[in-house]
Image: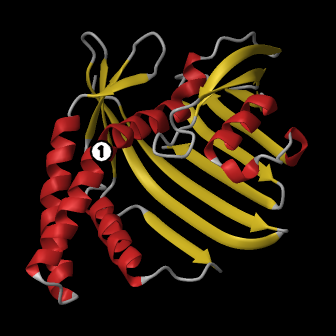
Amino acid sequence: MGDQKRIHTESVSKVFIKDSLLNNTEITGNYSIKVIDTVKSYTLLYSNEPNSVNIETKSSVPKLDSVVNFFTEIIQKIEKETNAFKYELLVDKNTGQAFKVKNGDQYLKMIEQVASTMINELGEKKEKTKAQIDSMKQKVILYFKLAEPKILETTINEFNYIMQPYSYTFPYNSTVSHKAMIQDVNALGEFGDVEMPAVLTISSKQHDSSLTIQSDTDYDKDFLLEQIKKKHKNMNDLTASDIFLSEKVVTIFTTTNSWMVSHKSNVVFKMKEVKVINETIVSFQ
């Protein structure tokens, strides 16, 4: 108990259409993990460091209308204000995977308080009427109330995605493949409620004082195609040859104390003329 680690993340997301860059988003952040209880499960205090998250987006997409911009600005400000919330994650001792946010109710209350204050300030600044401010307040709070379970699930998923190599079973200096069901880290995303069948290939290589584990996820393209067509009725002419999804993760452990040193992931998704690339580097300090 009392063990503590600092995590630095760098993430780049790029969207291309016909090989032309449409959107480029870069996110950097610092997080801390501290073990505060070890009785039944591990209880970890997991949070962003204050003012450490930086998001920079460059886009060639036309700006949205003023109403959408106003709503988006409020959501972004609320997310920024609640960014340093300290999540108490319950983690299974056997798998190393988090399964619950113990103080999730506190998070919802915090969002409601921040949302109310923020909307009042923005409403007055933009000279909105009291009725308009109250209406926007109801809409934003309702959004977060409905989204809260998915927000908390995403927090758990993000933590588990980084820590997943701790739960792998594999032979040293060798490779093994097995079937797996994979779920999107972002529970609020389009496929956040869908488990995807895939083949997970894990290889390990021992060095002098480190162990490198690489995982390659090969998704079932027919299943993925079926899900895309369900979500988008205008994609009925899409075929398996029109889509591509690749996910590779490389994790380095130090063998002196078994702590993770770094976690690098690369995800590439293509659908006809659209290509999305997500690259994330996580380092433990």
Q: Residue at x 78, y 40 (%)?
A: 246
Q: Position of residue 271 (x, y in %)?
A: 79, 52
Residue wearing tag 1: 146
In this view, the residue in front, 136 or 104, is: 136
Q: Is residue 202 above or below residue 217?
A: above
Left or right, 30 with respect to 103, comes to right
Left or right, 253 with respect to 18, comes to left
Q: In which image quadrant can residue 54 be found?
A: bottom left
In this view, the residue in front, 68 or 219, is: 68
Q: Is residue 54 above or below residue 86?
A: below
Q: Position of residue 157 (x, y in %)?
A: 47, 34
Tell me if residue 85 can be seen.
no
Tell me if residue 172 can be seen.
yes
Left or right, 152 with respect to 218, comes to left
Q: Amino acid at mark 1?
A: Leu
Q: Position of residue 21 (x, y in %)?
A: 75, 72
